Amino acid sequence: MTTTVTHAEQKDSPYALTHLDALESEAVHIFREVAGEFERPVVLFSGGKDSIVMLHLALKAFAPAAVPFSLLHVDTGHNFPEVLDLRDRTVAEHGLRLHVAKVQDYIDDGRLRERPDGLRNPLQTVPLTEAISAHRFDAVFGGGRRDEEKARAKERVFSLRDEFSQWDPRRQRPELWQLYNGRHAPGEHVRVFPLSNWTELDVWQYIAREGIELPEIYFAHEREVFSRDGMWLTAGEWGGPKDGEPVETRTVRYRTVGDMSCTGAVDSEATTLESVITEIAASRLTERGATRADDKMSEAAMEDRKREGYF
Amino acid sequence: MTSTTSPLTAEELSATTLLRFATAGSVDDGKSTLVGRLLHDSKSVLSDQLEAVERASLGRGQETPDLALLTDGLRAEREQGITIDVAYRYFATARRRFILADTPGHVQYTRNMVTGASTAELAVVLVDARNGVVEQTRRHAAVAALLRVPHVVLAVNKMDLVDYAEPVFAAIAEEFTSYAASLGVPEITAIPISALAGDNVVEPSANMDWYGGPTVLEHLETVPVSHDLTGCPARFPVQYVIRPQTAEHPDYRGYAGQIASGLLRVGDPVTVLPSGRTTTISGIDALGRSVHTAWAPQSVTVLLADDLDVSRGDLIAPTGSAPAVTQDVRATVCHLHERPLRIGERVLLKHATRTVKAIVKALPYRIDLSHGLAHDNDPAALEVNDIGAVQLRTAEPLPIDAYADSRLTGAFLLIDPADGTTLTAGMAGEAFAEPPSAAGGAAGDEGWDF
Ligand SMILES: Nc1nc2c(ncn2[C@@H]2O[C@H](COP(=O)(O)OP(=O)(O)O)[C@@H](O)[C@H]2O)c(=O)[nH]1
Ligand SMILES: [Mg+2]
């Protein structure tokens, strides 16, 4: 008995898919499974790149029929205007229905209090959870990717949440083949992550291949920024800069888009999709490491927020 | 010189294929070190991740960064220093994108290796060169064989601790290969490595010039990810019916799904199961493009010539090579949950896009994977991590293939109807393929087709 060593001659058959086709097919399969098995699915949609890619995949999955889901945006109140603009144009163009849950409403009527550090991303959990139970959504699509963060690396494509939206990493259902188990008790729901197996680079390559429109802030532009915790934050009425944080004009772009209070811009000259892709392929920092204050809080910051019901 | 040392161009990046693979090995065989090295040497560990690992390692008094912390993402895992759950890792070279299912090595986590292997096209089984083939190695080879992972790599690790001696490697490779072949594994590639020193992981080893084969990464980059699909019958589980009912598309009625195996062509005569009605394919929409041919694993929408009653849960297959429809399912299963599986238990069976009620009729035997597949007949129950045979009766007929013939339409889950818990992973038909050397050579020399 000898071992097989024939690698040099091995060729893929003409039926091998490119990695983008394989990932697209997997995501479409996930959307259709949810449409087939749930009563009231919703897509979390912020106008950021991952949610725009999710919506693009959903549109392809059900064409020429309409997407059989509504959309939900948890609005932190500190949004980039370019992002809200694209959000609203996209919703109108495809005749979709958008629900908006506003963190500001919760702060105004005292149900939530502003944090001392001014970060608003962590405040999204309560409005999100309440919107899910108020609308009785049973499946909630999120744009989370396993390459983003080490706790996410362990999360299932179908992730069961209890009535409080909590995630228990030790009690996850094993996920085998493409058999997703979406059974849940009344009041519980399932978070679904169709982009689980995508990387940041895949998302950008797919955007380029499909010609998907993104908010301009993803491309290099001049902006008034100030430095906090090693990140460039946008100067603005949300709370920056404080004393001793000088404002300067730099050429930057965003790699992720969240609340203005904790999403940093990176120095960049990349004004086209092509140059963004080249920049990401050469980057020595992960997308969240470069740009998110909310993940730097502790080693298990993301795991803890997810347990409490975060995206 | 390797493809992994410089950033890739946009063009290089978009023309790659995707390989899903899983790692296995006992505790301390060097799995985490190998994975860490593959990620590190392919420049997939970015500096903020490495800094986080360094901070965490220092925090617990380790001087060198513990690359295992890259994959052990949960608080409990880092606290206990073990891997509990399957973690998925992503990296890329100029030739391929990789999805790695990093599965824990402890015996009690057999279910996690089964989970990782269920979607893997390749499994890397690690062995410590000083210990050779041990009980866990046989268990992992058996899981790879059971799940029909098409390619198996034996990585004989820690060659630096046995003076890079060829006879040590050859003896282990020989023992493993004959064991795996007896389970029906069609293709085994054995590679001598040192995960710690980097020999034969990404770069060829200067210490083992007697070895002429590929490094681990070269092999991962070049192993074929798909077979000639024309040989396997098409299987198309219907996920959803697309009916726009708009002025533009008043009569459009398409069946959406992901092709589970084989090829579909416009004009093919097909049978819809379980009803058995026949028609032909009149059109295929491949996510916005109308095509003549589509193949696994593409997601498409199929249009049929006749107006049949087709809905989610049905299976479309070529007339003439459609699977038999049955209410009696014999299968090999891996039990995944702490709650044991017993005769008489009422469960839900999820197969492709259909979920039906089922009852456990018999538990003929349990298999001891570590001792030459010894059968323990008529067990009282299957406990968590047990692998055994199950006989089920379903409330409705199912078009189920033998897992050996079609991985996706031969697989199923058993689910607890009370709380939705996933209990058991099932594979219809016989547990292990015929060894390739057996008379008639059932599995043939070309490997398994999926
Ligand atoms: N000498 C030597 N030690 C190794 C090698 N690979 C791993 N080790 C060591 O073996 C121990 C266990 O390795 P680890 O990767 O944690 O094993 P795992 O339990 O399989 O993940 C660690 O102390 C490693 O440094 C190798 O190729 N040579
Ligand atoms: Mg380990």
Image (cartoon, coloured by chain):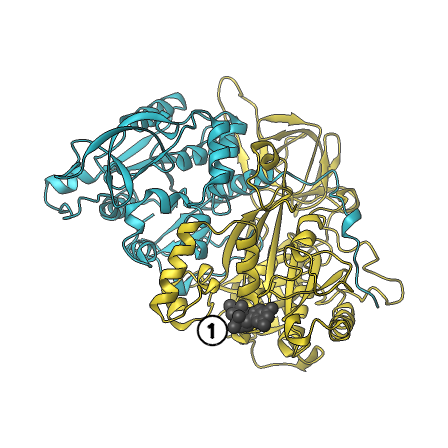
Is the CB of the residue bearing disc 1 within 8 angstroms of ligand 2?
no
Q: Position of residue B184 (x, y in %)?
A: 77, 65
Residue B312 visible:
yes
Q: Name the residue located 29 percent from the left edge and 39 percent from the top edge.
A: A263
What chain letter is assigned to the residue under label 1?
Answer: B
Observer-nearest of A50 and B420: A50
Chain in yellow on the image = B
Q: Quadrant of residue B319?
A: top right
Task: Provide residue B420's location: percent of width, then percent of height.
Answer: 44, 60
State which chain is coloured cyan. A
Q: From the viewer's perspective, is A42 left or right of B86?
A: left
Position above or below: B124 against A192: below
**Residue sitting at the far right:** B439
- Element type at mark 1: loop
Horizontal side of B424 relative to A226 (left or right) equals right
Q: How many marks?
A: 1
Residue B73, quarter of picture: bottom left
Examine the rendered structure and indicate whether residue A218 appears above or below residue B164: above
| Residue B35 screen position, x and y as percent | 55, 60
At 53% from the left and 21% from the top, the residue drawn is B250
Classify 10 Å Cα crowding around label 1: few (below 14), some (14-19), many (20 and above).
some
Asked whether B118 or A138 is in front, the reply is: B118
Farthest residue toward the front?
A: B206
Give the percent coordinates (x, y) of residue B231: 79, 45
- The vertical placement of B1 against A5, above or below, is above
Residue B29 shown left or right of residue B276 in the figure: left
Question: Which residue was labeled with disc 1?
Answer: B339
Q: Residue at x 66, y 82 (%)?
A: B376
